[in-house]
Amino acid sequence: MKFYAVHFVHYDSEGWKDKLQSHLDYLKGLVEKGILRASGPLKGTPVRSGLLIFSAQSREEVIEAMNGDPFMTHGLVNEMTITEWDPVFGTFSSESSGTVVP
């Protein structure tokens, strides 16, 4: 399994409020499936944004999971990045490659 950090931004406050509960329920389902390992809003940012940590076989699996999120299906995500991440230190380090590459 690989780790992926997903950062997304959404500007529509009303849409966000309308879809928040279904978004949270969807994320809880991903946690139960074991693909979503951590998630939460980024604080102190000028627009609403979130950070999600996935454990998946591929980037495509993460994209598929994100595409099912109500924020995505209702066009509320304006920007999104998906980056492979290797958690060498800390909570997920036992699942890391253990290699620090300069």
Image (spheres, rainbow, N blue to C red):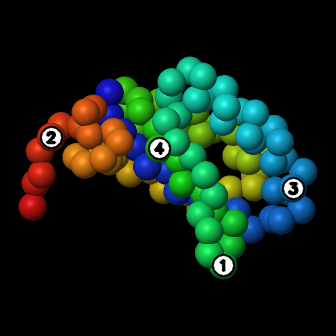
Closer to the chain start, of discs 3 and 1, is 3
Closer to the chain start, of discs 2 and 4, is 4
Q: Residue at x 60, y 29 (%)?
A: 30
Residue under numbered circle 4:
53
52 to the left or right of 83: right
Q: Secondary structure at mark 1?
A: loop
Q: Secondary structure at mark 3?
A: helix
Tell me the distance, in whole angstroms, between the alpha carbons under discs 4 and 3.
23 Å
Q: Residues within 10 Å of mark 4 (few under 14, many from 20)?
A: many
Q: Secondary structure at mark 2?
A: loop
Tell me the distance, in whole angstroms, between the alpha carbons under discs 3 and 1.
17 Å
Tell me the distance, in whole angstroms, between the alpha carbons under discs 2 and 4.
18 Å
* Tag 2–tag 1 contact (CB < 8 Å): no
Residue 2 x, y percent position in the rendering: 32, 34
Mark drawn on residue 46 = 1
Residue under numbered circle 2:
98
Mark drawn on residue 7 = none
* Tag 4–tag 3 contact (CB < 8 Å): no
| Pick the front one: 57 or 31 | 31
* Residue 22: quadrant of the picture: top right
Kindly identify the amino acid type of the residue bearing the numbered disc 1. Answer: Pro
Closer to the chain start, of discs 4 and 3, is 3
Q: Residue at x 15, y 40 (%)?
A: 98
| Pick the front one: 55 or 75 | 55
Closer to the chain start, of discs 3 and 2, is 3
Tell me the distance, in whole angstroms, between the alpha carbons under discs 3 and 2.
40 Å
Residue under numbered circle 3:
17
Kindly identify the amino acid type of the residue bearing the numbered disc 2. Answer: Gly
Question: Is 48 drawn above or below residue 82 in the view shown?
Answer: below
Tell me the distance, in whole angstroms, between the alpha carbons under discs 4 and 1.
22 Å
